[in-house]
Amino acid sequence: MMKKKILGTIALGSLLLITGCNVLAAEKGEQQLVNIKKDSAEQLEVELNIGVGNLDVTAGSNEWVEGTLEYSHEKLEPEVSYRLRGHTGKVKIDQQNDGFASNLNMGNFKNDWNLQLSEDVPMDLEVNNGASDTELHLNGLQLTSLEVNSGVGDLTLDLSGDWKESFSTNVSMGVGDTTMILPKDVGVKVTSSKGIGSSNFEGFISQGDGVYVNEAYKDADVILTVNMELGVGEINFKIEE
């Protein structure tokens, strides 16, 4: 599922109505309810593509995916799709580019995605944003891979917690400040490229050539491998308290 996105283009679009998704009138626009129900899938591939606005993702859904998508203009209406292919459930929430973004007054619109993901099956997760402040609090998920491609905006990526299986995370940053919170008792290895901005590693051990590890790494059976491609801005790597 994982693929590189070109994030200079802001994605916006139209709705594909599927079972479990409803669009309701909101006080200042529309509110789309997302409710992708559990089926026989044994693993999930989840792809989230937001153009502009705010994205907040957490664990804890009672179904495969639950949440709300609130937007103040019909041309911000996203497409939500789900299909079961073999034993894999494929989720995609997407905003297609139709040229509307170039005319947006950033202070006069709303586009907020608040989503909860299931903790019950292994998951590949891909997040792509054009110009969005993004909060990813993923403790509790059964991640098998994670890819985050960020264009413009601040990013918080919380991978704290007691992970049971090793996985790799690839993060590509554009312009903005990033905070990444990583576990204390699970092995962590961060490989960071050089960007225009600055990098701060709190509680990590440098191994040279942009490689940093936590204290648990040397004896760990479970390892989180983080490959970070830096952009413009400040990034802070922290060990959970």
Image (cartoon, grey):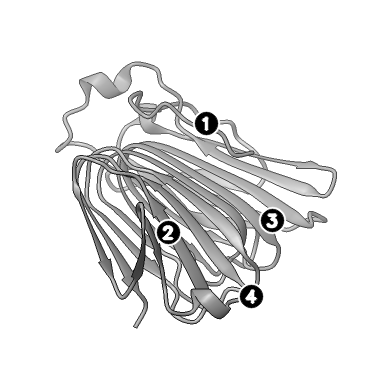
- Tell me which numbered mark, 1 or 4, is placed earlier along the sequence: 1
Q: What amino acid type should be assigned to the residue bearing mark 4? A: Asp
Q: What amino acid type should be assigned to the residue bearing mark 3? A: Lys
Where in the figure is residue 137, as x and y percent of width and height?
A: 43, 65
- Kind of element beneath mark 2: strand
* Residue 21 seen: yes
* Residue 25 seen: no
- Tell me which numbered mark, 3 or 2, is placed earlier along the sequence: 3
- Tell me which numbered mark, 3 or 1, is placed earlier along the sequence: 1
Label 1 vs label 2, nearer the camera: 2
Q: Which residue is mark 3?
A: 37
- Tell me which numbered mark, 2 or 4, is placed earlier along the sequence: 2
Q: Which image quadrant: the C terminus?
A: bottom left
- Tell me if mark 4 has few (under 14), some (14-19) or many (20+) residues whose alpha carbon lies within 10 angstroms of its own: few
Label placed on residue 221: 4
Residue ID at (79%, 54%): 41
Q: What amino acid type should be assigned to the residue bearing mark 1? A: Leu
Marks 4 and 3 in Cβ contact (< 8 Å)? no
Where in the figure is residue 168, as x and y percent of width and height?
A: 56, 55
